Structure formats: C-alpha cells, structure tokens
Image (cartoon, helix red, strand yellow):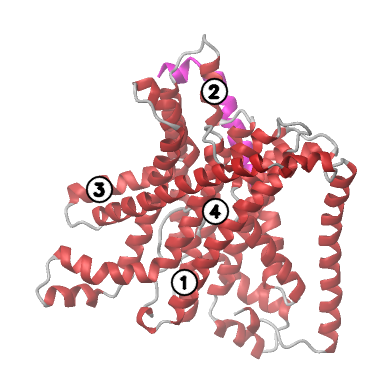
Amino acid sequence: MTSVLYDVPGPRAVRRNRILGAITVLVVLAVLGFIGYRLYVSGQFEASKWSLFTFTLVWQQIGEALVNTLAAFALAAVLSIVLGLVLAIGRLSDHRWLRIPVAAITEILRAIPVLVLMMLLYYGLPTVGVKMSPYWSVVLALMAYNGSVLAEVFRAGIQALPRGQSEAGYAIGLRKASVMRLILFPQAVRTMLPVIVAQLVVTMKDTALGFIITYPELLYLAKLFSTQPGRPILQSAFIIGGIYIVMCLILSGVAKYLEVRTRRSSKSRQPVAPAIAGDAATLTERIAVQKGSERRL
Amino acid sequence: MDAIFGNLDLWGSALLYTLIVFVAGGVIALVLGVIVGAMRVSSVPIARAVGTLYVNLVRNTPLTLVFFFFVFGYPQLGLPRLSNLVLAILAIGIYTATYVAEVLRAGINTVPVGQAEAARAIGLPFGQVMTLVILPQAFRSVVPPMMSVFIALLKNTTVAAGFSIPELAALRATINESHTRPGTPMEVLLWVAAIFVILVLLLSWVQNRLEKRWRVMR
C-alpha cells in the first residue's frame, strides 16, 4: 500500500529524500550522542560501575533469575491457552446460562489491570486466609488476563470461519463437540496462530511486573544489584533489559514468521472478520486482522 | 464501604494521579505516535528505517523496564531533576507512542489501494493524496483500535504504582501502612479493580458508539 502512495523518486525527489534522511539521521544521532555524552560525563562507563558483572556468582544469579522469569512465563503461557480455550468454548455455547456468565467473566478479567490482579492475589488473598507465593500470584494473574484475551482471539477465529464449514460438519452427522474439535478449532488455530504467539510476547513482557510484587525475576535482580558497591543501576538495567528485549524479539520473530507463512499458505485464505471487539494490551489482533483485510481489498 | 468512605481524601488524590498519568501520557503518545507513524509511511527510506527500529525495539521492551530506565536511570545522568511523576508520564508516553504509530500505519493500510491509485491518476500530488483521500478514510478505521490503545494505556498506568507514584494501585500500601485507616488489602484492591472495570467499560462503550457511527461501508 505505502508504495502506491508515491512514485519512484525522480532527481528532485531523490535530493529532497536525501536531505530529509540526513536530517533524520542527524536528529537521531544528536539524541543518542547526547545520552551517550551524559552517560560518559556522569561516569557510567567507568570500570567500577561495571566491575560487578565480572563475577561468576553474579552471572549465576542472573541465570537463576532468568530461570524464574521463564518458569513463570512458561506455566502462564500454557495455562492461559487452556483458560482461553475453555472461555472461548463457554462463550460460543448455545446455552444462555453458560454463555452470559462466561462472557461477563471474560470482560471483567480483561478490564482489570494485570498488576492489580497480581496484587489482589499476593496482598489481598492473605486477608481472607489464603497464602499465595509471589510465583503463583504472577502465574495466576497472567493466566487470568491473557486467558481472557486469548478467549476473544479464539472466538474471533472461529466466528471468522465460513458458515459452510460447521454446516457441512453437521450435514455429515457430526455432533456439536465433534464439529468444534475436528472442523472449527484446527482451522481457527491455524489462522490465529500469529496472534496467539503475539499475545505470548505480551505474557513474556508482563512477567516483568512480578518485580513489583517481589517475585525474584530478572528486573527484581536488577534493582537488587543497585545496592551493590558502585551502585550500578543503569548498568544492570542495560544488561537485564538486553536479555528481556532479546527474548521478546525472538518470540516476536516467531510470530512474524508464522504470519508470513499463514498468509502464503493456500489453506487459510478466508479473510479474518475485522470485528474483534474490545481492548488488548497490544492490539496485535487488530493489526493482524487489518493486515489480513488488506489482502482482500 | 469503610475502605472507601474512611479514606475519601486518599481515593480522590489517587484517582487524580491515575488520570493525570493517563491524560498526559496519552497526549505525549499521540504526538510522538503521529510523528513516528508518519515516518513509517514516509517516502524517505531512512525515516522509515528509524521508525521501524523504534517501534520494534520499544514494543518488545516490558513497560516495567521502560519505567525502570526512566525513574531509576534518568537521575543517574546528572541532568536537571525531574519528579517521578514527570518521568513516569514520559515513560508511559514513549511506550504507548509505538502502539499509536502502529494503529495509524495499519489504518492507512486499510484504505483500498484503488483509492490511492485513483487519486494519483487524477494527478494529485502526495500531500493532497494524503490529506484529501487517504487520511479521511483512514481516520474512520483508526478510531476504534485507537480507543483500544487508550484503554490499554489506562490499565498500564497501574505500573506507575511500583515506582512510587501515589495512584490507584498504590493505595493499598498507603492505607495498610498507616494503622489508623480502615480497610483490609483485599477490600482496597477489590475497589481499585472495580474502579478500573468501570473506567474501562466506559471507554469501551465510547468505542462502540464511535465504531457504529463511523463504520466504513464497503
């Protein structure tokens, strides 16, 4: 689309583009240079600030924190997919007594900020006599939130399928459960896979919230390091932040790859309905949907 | 109910802080997001590359980490002191700007190719193609997802509670650490959750209204 908006640049446009490009580069370099200069002036590059990261023990701690982060992420990812399936099936049910409560639960879980959910589990539950470890608070809060978002993703995926799919299923004598399991879900999951993985990136990013309720994950460790000699808070933020960003980039890369592959494969060419309601921390689904509809036009 | 009426002063200021972070962060996100979104569809390859890099980098950074850099990192640079509130607003604004930029780009991409082709065919220059043909149509499909970005922004303001901004999610600590104020953590947090549910439902309702009014008929 963007390439339709302008011609292949002629000599004048090339010159103008070069000038604009040079200005962009200058502005970016100026901002980066200024930050670099301030880092240098305030002595952030001095060896004493970085010496902490020459110890093996420190890297062992980082490794442990990384394992903690990944443990919370992995369990939360699996549980949220399961919860998402359950809620999606409930919301697609033919029975009103099941559909309406499930819809209400999904909407409410999606409306509560993840951090408030975590706090409810970690600080709130002990008042009613249930002790909750930080690990389970993080996992359950992420499960509840991402599960409800994924439920909407699954539902949108199923509703976007042509009616003929389920009708054909009923016509050959399958029951509701079999139609869902054998016909609708495999197709919906295939079209929605990029969105599901993109939601897992959100899950991964949100594990960092565990830092606020004292779950000893990577960011918590970064804060802990700032009390060490030299107070290397920026340095630990750079290293830990780098780890986070690389992990999320890898996962986003997988989502991107799946999206490109889905778009190419001929089996899933039905357009996705551009009507996924409501919010999502990322909007990835909206964007994915809109990318999908772009093809159609 | 005691948790509300016994601490009415605190709830008022907490809600105010949440709204300040929300509105100020939203304004920064909109301004920066429009700039970055424009860069991502511009005809200047370098600007596109810079925009893409910014969006990909920040979108793959946890918001908590962005806050960490701003609230804990910035004071290390020896620049003029800024209050935590300002730093938190900057952090959330810069984070949300990437989502605004993506929504804008996706919105421009939903306008059928034929529209741009037709506008080009009748000889409109780039500026007029954008302002007269593309953007008015893109605006309609941008509004609903943009509201979703703002709903997410509202919920993300809670992260500021972890960085000593006295907003809604931080109320639990304030109330429970003073021994004279009524309310258990559970009560306070349930009320906070209820307030967020109400605010989010309100925004979703506005979103649905706008979506109905501006639905694109194609």
Q: Is residue A114 left or right of residue B44?
A: left
In the image, the segment drawn in magenta is B1-25
The amino acid sitting under disc 4 is Val
Q: Residue at x 48, y 61 (%)?
A: A198
Question: To which chain does the residue with label 4 belong?
Answer: B
Q: Earlier in the sequence, mark 2 or mark 4?
A: 4
Judge by depth and name the residue closer to the eye, A267 or A15. Answer: A267
Please tell me if label 2 and label 4 are on a single chain: yes
Query: Which residue position holds label 1?
Result: A258
* Secondary structure found at label 4: helix
Q: Is residue B3 left or right of residue A31?
A: left
* Secondary structure found at label 3: helix
Task: Compute the Cα span from label 2 to label 3.
Answer: 35 Å
Question: To which chain does the residue with label 3 belong?
Answer: A
Numbered-mark total = 4
Please tell me if label 1 and label 4 are on a single chain: no
- How far from the left and from the top, in percent, is residue A173? 9, 74
Query: Which residue position holds label 3?
Result: A100
Query: Which residue position holds label 2?
Result: B173
Q: Residue at x 58, y 35 (%)?
A: B18
Task: Compute the Cα span from label 2 to label 1.
Answer: 43 Å
Please tell me if label 4 and label 3 are on a single chain: no
Please tell me if label 2 and label 1 are on a single chain: no
- How far from the left and from the top, in percent, is residue A203? 48, 51
- How far from the left and from the top, in percent, is residue A270? 36, 78
Q: Which mark is residue B149?
A: 4
Residue B21 falls in image quadrant: top right
Q: Earlier in the sequence, mark 3 or mark 1?
A: 3
The amino acid sitting under disc 2 is Ala
Question: To which chain does the residue with label 2 belong?
Answer: B
The amino acid sitting under disc 3 is Ile
User: Which of the two marks, 2 or 1, is nearer to us in this view?
Assistant: 1
